Image (cartoon, rainbow, N blue to C red):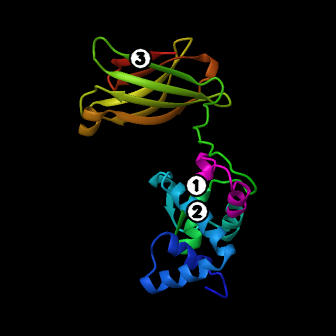
Amino acid sequence: MTANHDPQLLGAYVLGALDEQEVRAVDDHLAGCPTCSAELAELRAMEEAMGEVPPEALLDGPPDGGDLLLQRTLRQVRAERGGQLRRRQVGLGLVAAAVAAVVLGGGFAVGRTTAPEDFAQVTPTTAPAPPAGTKLGTATDPVTGARMTVQVRPAAGWVRVNASVAGIAANEKCRLLVVAKDGSRQEAGSWLVSPAGEKDGTNLDGSALIAPEEVAAIEVQNFDGERIVTVPL
């Protein structure tokens, strides 16, 4: 410690992880070493900031380039010495990562969400928007009580269909039909309703050779041709 100004030992000192003999040795060294005294003040500031980092921000495993992360964070702390440490969300994450790297050698760290040269906010991911021309619809048949929600996605001269169907009795044989504006129908799929499907509904995908702009409705019929539910589009 006296010769090398060991930052790992100093970090353990901040967190109270040393035995009595080691604490006395660090105290003796700090009494005559302004460099380590300054580092101690910085580490204590970072240790306080760690208390503000939510537990869910900490992940197992050190980040790639952890040493570089530590160096950047210490430079930031030194730049702000004499003023209040900024309480930015990602800034606090970097502080926690720096303390972890000093004291635990990278035993835990904040997730890898920071830009290379700056503190960056995490951008949440979003589901991609459906293709232009996608049609959505839902309906409940007043007679049968069956319910269906559909999504029809356009392709090159044909359509992809996703349907969630509920309220049909088990063992019913069903057809999923795409209805064109001229009244013609193309089968997009068929299935046998299971006991689980009767209870929780059935989700299925299909396709039909009908131009997207010609689709008027999606319909479910049984194998006797009886209509069970229709969703106009």
Quadrant containing the N terminus is bottom right
Label 2 SS = helix
The disc labelled 3 sits on which kind of residue? Answer: Thr
Is residue 165 placed above or below 231 in the rendered structure?
Answer: below
Lower position in the chain sequence, tag 3 or tag 1: 1
Is residue 14 placed above or below 202 in the rendered structure?
Answer: below
Judging depth in this view, the residue of 55 and 190 nearest the camera is 55
Which residue is at 51% across, 75% downward?
12
The disc labelled 2 sits on which kind of residue? Answer: Ala
| Pointer 3 with pointer 1, Cβ within 8 A | no
Question: What residue did someone put label 3 on?
Answer: 230
Q: Residue furthest front?
A: 31
Label 3 SS = strand
| Pointer 1 with pointer 2, Cβ within 8 A | yes
Where is residue 101? Give x, y as percent. 59, 70
Mark 3 vs mark 2: give the one in front.
2
Lower position in the chain sequence, tag 3 or tag 2: 2
Question: What residue did someone put label 2 on?
Answer: 97
Question: What residue did someone put label 1 on?
Answer: 93
Label 1 SS = helix
Disc 3 versus disc 1: distance between alpha carbons?
53 Å
What segment is highlighted magenta in the picture? Answer: 74-93
Judging depth in this view, the residue of 90 and 14 nearest the camera is 14
Q: Is residue 92 on the magenta stretch?
A: yes
Where is residue 228? Give x, y as percent. 33, 19
The disc labelled 1 sits on which kind of residue? Answer: Gly
Disc 1 versus disc 2: distance between alpha carbons?
6 Å
